Amino acid sequence: MYSFRSATYTSLSPKLFEFVSPPNLSNPSLLLFNSSLAKSLGIDPHSCTVDSLLGSHSCEKSFAQAYAGHQFGHFTMLGDGRAIILGEHSLPSGECVDIQLKGSGRTKFSRGGDGLATASSMLREYVYSVVMRALGIPTSQSLAVILTNQTVLREQPYSGGILVRVMNSHIRFGTFEFVSNYCSLDEFRAFTDYVIDRHYSFLSSSSEKYLLFFQEVMKKCISTVVEWLRVGFVHGVMNTDNMSIVGLTFDYGPCSFMNRYHSHKTFSQIDQLKRYSFSRQRDMLKWNLSVLGETLLPLFGSDDRIAQQLLVQELSSFDELFSTAFFTMMKNKLGSKDISPVLIEEFLLFLETYQLDYTSTFIELMDPGTFDDPIFSSQEFVKWRNCFSSFHQDSSLMRKYNPYKILRNHLLEEALFEFEESGSLKKINELLAVLSSPYQKDDFLNKYYFHPPEDFDELYQTHCNT
Ligand code: AMP
Ligand code: MG
């Protein structure tokens, strides 16, 4: 079913991975399957059985990747503790993607963990990746969720699940930290050349390829994080091991969409210091890039001082690059390139002061009178709307940048609760269907448009993917 090439990753130093056999499950069953993704990968959806999705018919050796990372600022050795890459699947276009199983059992990187995942946490990841994709945001993709027929013990017993995750790379900033810390300089250079040849091949023959590579990663990540800010997404755990080297959003654990605008909103129960709050995602990206950049210093040049200077210079361009991308995005949301950054900042302050729902506010600017909420007919709001409309807003632009529907936390929780209680996927499938067209305006009495009941956000807490 998969069209695996001979894996290129395993030609690297054996310190970087461990061969692990695919799971051998007694009676697994398919919960969700993404047939449109299968087709886009050149896979015939009818050929996908549970066994074939789990790699049973593959002749390639699957493997777990080693990586390290800074978790909440602290360096730790990590690695795929509950995931394996089944292989590198070739698309008809010639491109290649990693097919990964998450929740597939212990590896040598599991530390104290059981290597497993609950089905509901894998369903959560599946839903998030589909929603982010539909919103047009770079993301890992999900081919299937499989029920393992195993019990996973957390604070109570849960059904086990495996996610079949697809990314053009599972290499993280933390993979660079691992190789830089635990391998020789030759191995580090070979690894970096591998990443450049595989994912940034247009740089391969440049004499300055390492510096240019860093710039490209920075640009890609900036544009992804700006996209998060466009839709109110809070990743929740931007540790360097969760930062993709190709700029994809991935590892959907304690993430959430913000409802009422709150620049320091975090939902993650473990993020007490709000390190990864909504608007700090910008600073945290810069911090993570500085960690990545430090690993690359020996490749920037043999003179340490000059290499350091080059990195400082690159990082000093971050703020301007980010601000330009951010304000361009906000101007598009507001429908006019003539709206100034100062006005945008004042408007965000207004949202914060009145705790307005981020998504609904922009819908009200596009389609006045949509919501029956007194705040949208208040003098203050009407003043802002009139102010923006004096800039000759382009409504077709606004419709491209402002989703009508985002994944509302309370609806996702309801859907997952229904699955945990009864095994039913009815609400999950309904969410997936509605959110596959986030820019389409449906019946406005539809519950998907509304923010949650009062104080839901205040009480809502997300957890690391269990
Ligand atoms: P995450 O929070 O998903 O980014 O995971 C951080 C690290 O913990 C990674 O090295 C994971 O592989 C590992 N990990 C998370 N959950 C488990 C588990 N149940 N068993 C083994 N390793 C795990
Ligand atoms: Mg992770």
Image (cartoon, grey):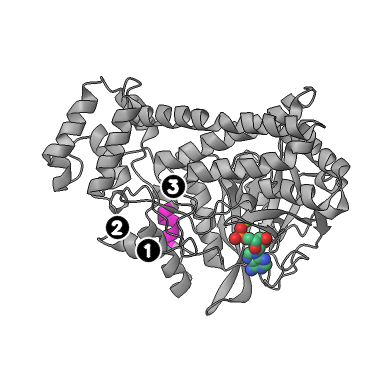
In this rendering, would 79 be left or right of 251?
right
Q: What element carries label 3?
A: strand
**Residue labelled with disc 2:** 452
**Residue labelled with disc 1:** 460
In this rendering, would 358 be left or right of 178?
left
What's under tag 1, amino acid-wise?
Answer: Tyr
Residue 133: give x, y in percent of width and height: 51, 42
Q: Give the magenta part as a residue range.
A: 426-431
Residue at the location (58% across, 44% down)? 287
Furthest-front residue in this view: 305
Q: Can residue 423 be seen in this view?
A: yes
Tell me the CA gap for discs 2 and 1. Answer: 10 Å
Quadrant holding the C terminus:
bottom right
Residue 307 vertical position relative to residue 35 in the rendered view, above or below: above
Residue at the location (26% across, 32% down)? 366
Residue count near mark 2 (Cα–Cα under 10 Å), binned few <14, some 14–19, many ≥20: some
Residue 428: give x, y in percent of width and height: 44, 59
